[in-house]
Amino acid sequence: MTRLTDEMLMAYADGALSEAERAEIAAALESDAEARSIVAEFRRTAEISRAAFADVLTEPVPDRLVDTVLGTQTHATNVVDLARTRKPRSTMWRTAIPLAASVLLVIGLAAALLVRQQPPAQLIALGPVPSATSLADVLETKPSGTPVALASRTSEGVDRLMVVATFRDRKERICREVEALDPSMQAQIAGVACRDPASGTWIVEGSARIAATAPPSGHDFIPSGADQKDALDGLLAVLGATRALPADEEQGLLASGWK
Amino acid sequence: MTAAETDIRHQIVALLPRLRRFALTLAGSRDLADDVVQSACEKALGRLDQFMPGTRLDSWMFQIVRTTFIDHIRRQKRRQHDDLTPDLVESLPSDARIHEQTVARADLAVVRAEIGRLPDEQREVLALITVEGLSYQDAADMLGVPIGTIMSRLSRARRKLARALDAPPARPGHAEGLPQ
């Protein structure tokens, strides 16, 4: 008879056991209701602990931290006050972008509702975009508003990528807002990537899961969709995105390799 | 700056959201968390030569964030600032516009507050393993303690957290543990 310690039940709940150990505990649990409730409790504490800090992952990283790591010139020593800067800037950004793009933004961002909290989007993952990926190709070579099919539908349910708009950030870097769309052209993931002029690498500065569908009910900890939308709005504000480049200017930059 | 160094800097930038989350879980306040992450990044950049290529950069950075945070707390204690209560008001959600969101977010603020009340050694294993997803063994290696100790700390932390969250709130509608 296996004596079920808290540590064993936790490891079972966390999926940290070998197959043999897992099977042994699963068998012991069948006749032990109290142990089953402890396993459920361990699962719950894992879920709520992750949920409690999930919003930090999708909010923009303060400029000063990025500047510290990249060794770039600091233009603001303090954390940008997002609450104050985000709203007016994002409004300017919205109204200044071309109509076609703004319609997509409304679908993608303004009307966004979060499906539920999930790990950060893998397709548009934070950090440098590996070369020779669909995302790198779309960012480097495709004009705004042109959906590009992925090789296959991802586990996130999306099968195409599309740049929504191009702009220059405060550091004069070229940045592009990109969305991952499902087969019905609904944006599921949105992100902003900026091009490092020295290396030509695109770096995803932020991404968020978005979807124009209602969240499923019955989940205790559904952060609002507005959180993730705000995170992107805040990111655009931090980057200093005030207006999208006109199509002809974008075309010229595409043709010249962003020079 | 060599290409390898540029590459590692970009990798650290990509880790920043997780480093901030880890620091926030430890520190309980965003301002303090960002100060800790900034100091930790400065330290890391000063000793990039000590990072062994092929090992996990995230574990290395978490380690530096952790020691930076501990140093900070020690300094603070030396200065007799005994108010180490996490800044719970700051961690409370802002801009809650819709009622249901308010409820869900308040719950999460209570969770943060209760995590903030765990003993330091329990909170850090919760942060590393449960929130950041390190394995028990990776956390044991990082902290230099046996895996059994890690599992014992983590299970006690989570049972304590569950009990605290199940307890009826002293004042309904008010996040428990707020400093008065």
Image (cartoon, rainbow, N blue to C red):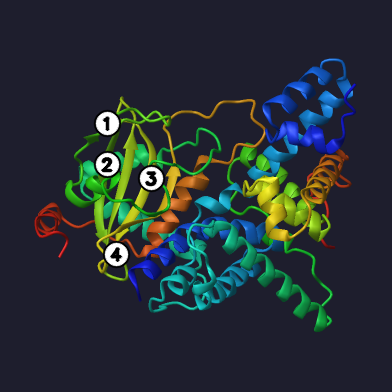
Marks 1 and 3, the one that precedes in the sequence: 3
Q: Upstream in the sequence, badge 1 or badge 2?
A: 2
In the image, what residue type sits under mark 3?
Ile
User: Where does label 3 land, which residue?
Assistant: A124
Q: Give the x, y percent position of residue A225.
A: 50, 40
Q: Distance between the residues labelled 4 and 1?
A: 26 Å
Q: Do the residues labelled 1 and 2 touch (CB within 8 Å)?
A: yes
- Let me know if marks 2 and 4 both belong to one chain: yes
Q: In this view, does B93 lie above or below A33?
A: below
Q: Disc 2 vs disc 3: which is toward the camera?
A: 2
Graded by Cα atoms within 10 Å as few (under 14), some (14 to 19) or many (20 or more), the crowding at tag 4 reads some
Please provide percent x and percent y for residue A241: 32, 61
Q: Which residue lies furthest to the top in this view?
A: A31
- Residue where numbered disc 1 is placed: A151
The numbered mark, 2 or 4, whose residue comes first in the sequence reads: 2
Disc nearer the start of the sequence (3/4): 3
Whole-number angstrom distance, CA of label 3 to CA of label 4: 17 Å
Dot 1 amino acid type? Ala
Which secondary structure lies at badge 2?
helix
Q: Mark 2 points at which residue?
A: A134
Please rate how many residues cluster around mark 1, counting C-alpha atoms within 10 Å: few if below 14, some from 14 to 19, many from 20.
few
